[in-house]
Amino acid sequence: MLEDVSRITEAKAVPEDLMPVKFISHARSLLGIGGWVAVQVRPEIFFAFVVLSQQIVVNLSKACWQAVLQWARHLVAHRNYKLTYSGLGLKEDFEFFVDSSLINGPDAGSLGGYVGCFPRSGAFAWRTLCHRSAVDSSMGAELLFAVTAGKAVLGWRMLARELEQASRGPTTLHIDASAVLGALERNVVTRESRFLAARLAMLREMTQVALIAKKIATGDNIADAMTKALKEVDFVRHRENLGVLPSPV
């Protein structure tokens, strides 16, 4: 599989006039092969996969093609990295992290994502989601994806219970948005938050039965890797925290 990626990424610079005819199939092949890897075992490249997949549908420009090549080459160069789980972390209840970011420009909307993992162990659940024009504020985006992550938590708790591995207590949902946590605590619908009342009520109900919403520093939120492009030092740090580590050769 990765040999196919390597072969396609050896392509040279592409003239603009060839882009719509020939290279869109190459881009789809790269994203299709690499995307399977990202979905199954490589959470740290999942955000780039989602963004690039959307871009080639809208317009495969030369810049987009080069970005696809760079993403695929990174995958090939780091093919020895594996999702790694620690037995120590599996002895504790799992936890979730959630984050979001607004999209500016004509395609305004919000990107959000979540990560589920055991403490000091690899991720077992991750998603990056894009909602176009779903919200008009950062708090609205954070709340939207906090509810989405909460639904994922409920699903995983149900699965754990069916496997007779039920959690010993509520699942921690780490959120770096102080506005969302404050709205949960106040339990008051204001003029500014009335449009978010239904989602607030849903998240509040989840915290009463299955969740503990806890504040986390933005720099420590590993769900950042699901929502935005990161500096290299932050990318490497979050990759390690996601449990993606180099395997011995």
Image (spheres, helix red, strand yellow):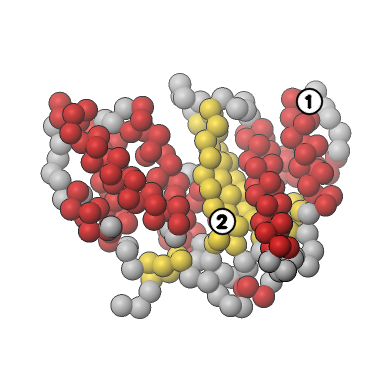
| In the depicted structure, whether residue 213 falls above or below residue 136 | below
Comparing 208 with 157, the one in front is 157
Is the N terminus in the top left, top right, bottom left or bottom right quadrant? bottom left
Looking at the rendered structure, the secondary structure element under dot 1 is helix
Q: In this view, does 41 lie to the left or right of 194?
A: left
Residue 175 seen by the camera:
no
Residue at 61 percent of width and 78 percent of height: 88
Looking at the rendered structure, the secondary structure element under dot 2 is strand
Q: Quadrant of residue 188?
A: top right
| In the depicted structure, whether residue 47 falls above or below residue 244 | above
Sort mark 2 into few (<14), some (14-19) or many (20+) by Cα contacts within 10 Å. some
| Residue 194's disc number | 1
Give the number of callouts: 2
Name the mark nearer the viewer: 2 or 1. 2
Q: Which residue position is annotated with label 2?
A: 125
Residue at 67 percent of width and 59 percent of height: 159
Residue projecting furthest to the front = 162
| In the depicted structure, whether residue 21 falls above or below residue 142 | above
| Residue 114's disc number | none
Q: Is residue 144 left or right of residue 69?
A: right
